Image (tube, coloured by chain):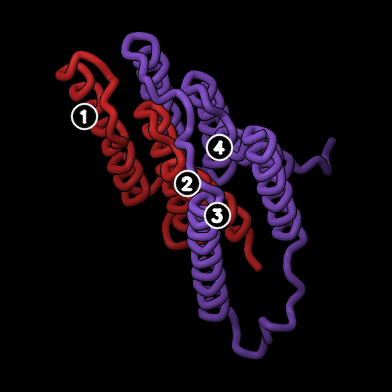
Chain colours: A purple, B red
């Protein structure tokens, strides 16, 4: 067990624990199910923070998230809302919101990528061409996983509408 | 490509999922849950940048202070929601929040 690398394993477990329930939460209509799903998401974020090494923020985050999730769960029982369903929107407005969110995602990823490339080029000698570097395979895995999640969300919306 | 980028993809996707849920849902508790998801994404991105980016140690004062700030915002949000609900006596307003 000497060659076993714990951190990548923990990263993939926590990435799955974070992204799959987060995608699933968009398809849920009952707030109680949503709160329980988001508890799993917070546990995944806690594991990700721990895998970075930020133990204190992770513990603070987990305690605060548990408190607020308990508040949400009891709040749903004590003060039930009429709006249990998602808003009945037209396909056009759902598409517009989805496109807006996709644009926000693309802008964020582009900004992160640019910032990462700049910090890499600032920290290393100048003779290395960063355009020729092969990208990390894990990025493609995450992006393809996100694509599958989006397809899953779209299919579940379609099934719900029927 | 550094190890930072996968964490940033996850945090950005958490933020965007929360944003999309926020735009679609009308229930107050669901909105609070999606806001929590967005704040989780922000905290993850911040910790990744400060931790893996090499600017500071992940348990440094700055990251702990900003995490505290984001979590205080979450708790304040929850208190405001609770007070509003307690004030009205019911959570049945027709207008979306």
Mark-to-mark CA distance, 1 and 3: 32 Å
Query: Where is mark 4, residue-wise?
Result: A26
Q: Residue furthest left?
A: B87
Spatial CA span between label 2 and label 1: 22 Å
Left or right of A119? Residue A131 is: right
Instruction: Name the chain under label 4.
Output: A
* Mark 3–mark 2 distance (CA, rounded to whole Å): 23 Å
Task: Decide if residue A148 is in sight here.
Answer: yes
Q: Are marks 2 and 1 in contact (CB under 8 Å)?
A: no
Of labels 4 and 3, earlier in sequence is 4
Badge 2: residue crowd in 10 Å (few <14, some 14–19, many ≥20): many
> What residue is pinned by disc 1?
B80
- x, y (%) of residue A94? 52, 49
- Where residue A65 sits in the image (x, y, percent)? 41, 28
Task: Give the spatial CA distance, label 1 vs label 4.
Answer: 24 Å
Corner quadrant of residue A27:
top right
């Amino acid at each position: 067990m000497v060659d076993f690398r714990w951190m990548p394993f923990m990263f993939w477990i926590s990435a799955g624990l974070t992204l799959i329930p987060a995608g699933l939460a968009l398809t849920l209509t009952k707030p109680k199910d949503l709160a329980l799903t988001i508890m799993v998401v917070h546990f995944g974020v806690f594991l990700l923070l721990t895998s970075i090494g930020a133990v204190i923020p992770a513990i603070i985050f987990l305690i605060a998230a548990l408190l607020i999730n308990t508040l949400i769960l009891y709040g749903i029982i004590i003060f039930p809302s009429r709006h249990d369903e998602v808003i009945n929107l037209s396909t056009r407005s759902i598409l517009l919101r989805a496109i807006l969110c996709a644009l926000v995602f693309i802008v964020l990823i582009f900004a992160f990528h640019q910032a990462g490339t700049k910090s890499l080029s600032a920290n290393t000698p100048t003779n290395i061409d960063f355009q020729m570097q092969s990208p990390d395979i894990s990025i493609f895995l995450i992006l393809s996983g996100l694509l599958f999640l989006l397809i899953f969300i779209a299919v579940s919306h379609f099934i719900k509408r029927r | 490509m550094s190890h930072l980028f996968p964490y940033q993809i996850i945090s950005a996707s958490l933020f965007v999922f929360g944003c999309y849920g926020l735009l679609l849902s009308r229930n107050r508790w669901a909105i609070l849950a999606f806001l929590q998801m967005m704040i989780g994404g922000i905290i993850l991105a911040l910790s990744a940048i400060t931790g893996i980016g090499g600017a500071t140690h992940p348990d440094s004062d700055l990251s702990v202070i900003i995490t505290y700030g984001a979590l205080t915002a979450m708790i304040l949000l929850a208190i405001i929601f609770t007070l509003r609900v307690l004030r009205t006596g019911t959570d049945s307003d027709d207008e979306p929040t």
